[in-house]
Image (cartoon, rainbow, N blue to C red):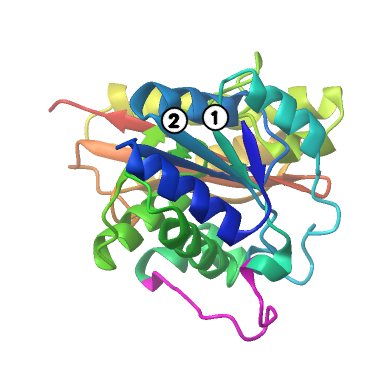
Amino acid sequence: MQIYRTIAELQQALFTARQQNFSVALVPTMGNLHEGHLALVKQAKTDCDFVITSIFVNPTQFGPNEDLNAYPRTFDEDISALHGLACDAVFAPEVDEIYPDGLKLETRVSVPSLARLLCGTSRPGHFDGVCAVVSKLFNLCSPDKAYFGEKDYQQLCIIRRLVRDLNFPLEIISVQTHREASGLAMSSRNNYLSEDQKQQAAVIFRTLEQSAETLREIQMPDLRSLEEIALGKIQAAGLRPEYFAICNPDTLQPAHSIDQHFRLLTAARLGQTRLIDNIGVNISK
């Protein structure tokens, strides 16, 4: 496995891979890798010949009051984990390699129909930063496939739309959310939680599951009432919920009782830590 710090080094390695007719996979990450990230790399290695994992803490997707400086950086541990998976290349650039003209002058990329909903209401500009850096990585790597986790479901929907609308010639592959034993979705931000808080935060997944079961059992449920009940459960456990939404899985607009496919998404804060999760529900009527 080789580590590349510059675009020139990365593209030389990709030129060599393409000369050998290798298929190329990209796994974009911000590092601090956990089993969820590693599952993406494993799937990419199964599907493609040459796997690139990017490790880049992207400053443009952090708001002014968010945790850019505190975001956990565990580069040596990440590299050790990737060595064990036979990852072929790691792209770990400095900020000025990706944004050579500074952060205020970078080109903006936006998917407003999806980015202004749900997490976008409390994190304005976040998804524009995601779209910009992902677009850069797609252009730099020209992957055949790129891999993203379903834990960040809104992000996944936005990237799929980005690829469709801008005609990127690649396939987006999603991988199911990896969870801790309690059901808590694995996330780099879980590092901010104590063990007791992790157990407390497990109410998020329990509430998603309970709401999904209600959807399966009751014909024509009142979805907005179900959302309010779920918010109450999360709040009663000592978290501060931002939203609990039952959505169309493609548009992320509010779902209707007559629908057959749903995505349940939620965000809540525990202390200073913001947690998100989601599950899908399909119903035959």
Q: For residue 107: magenta?
A: yes
Q: Which residues are magenta?
A: 98-112
Residue 217 versus residue 128 in the image, above or below:
above
Using the image as rendered, state which of residue 103 and residue 196 is in the foreground. Answer: 103
Residue 207 got which mark? 1
The residue lying at 59 percent from left, 65 percent from top is 126
Q: Position of residue 27 (x, y in %)?
A: 50, 40
Can residue 108 be seen here? The reply is yes
Quadrant of residue 35 within the rendered picture:
top right
Using the image as rendered, state which of residue 58 and residue 284 is in the foreground. Answer: 58
Quadrant of residue 111 within the rendered picture:
bottom left
Do tag 1 and tag 2 residues touch (Cβ < 8 Å)?
yes
Residue 211 got which mark? 2
Using the image as rendered, state which of residue 74 and residue 13 is in the foreground. Answer: 13
Q: Position of residue 239 (x, y in %)?
A: 73, 41
Q: Amino acid at mark 2?
A: Ser
Q: Amino acid at mark 1?
A: Thr
Residue 205 versus residue 159 in the image, above or below:
above
Q: Position of residue 90 (x, y in %)?
A: 61, 41
Can residue 146 be seen here? The reply is no
- Residue 244 appears left or right of 19: right
- Residue 168 appears left or right of 121: left
The residue lying at 50 percent from left, 55 percent from top is 11
| Element type where label 2 sits in the image | helix
Quadrant of residue 171 within the rendered picture:
top left
Residue 189 versus residue 210 in the image, above or below:
below
The residue lying at 85 percent from left, 23 percent from top is 196
The residue lying at 62 percent from left, 86 percent from top is 105
| Element type where label 1 sits in the image | helix
Packing grade of label 1 (10 A; few <14, some 14-19, many >=20) is some
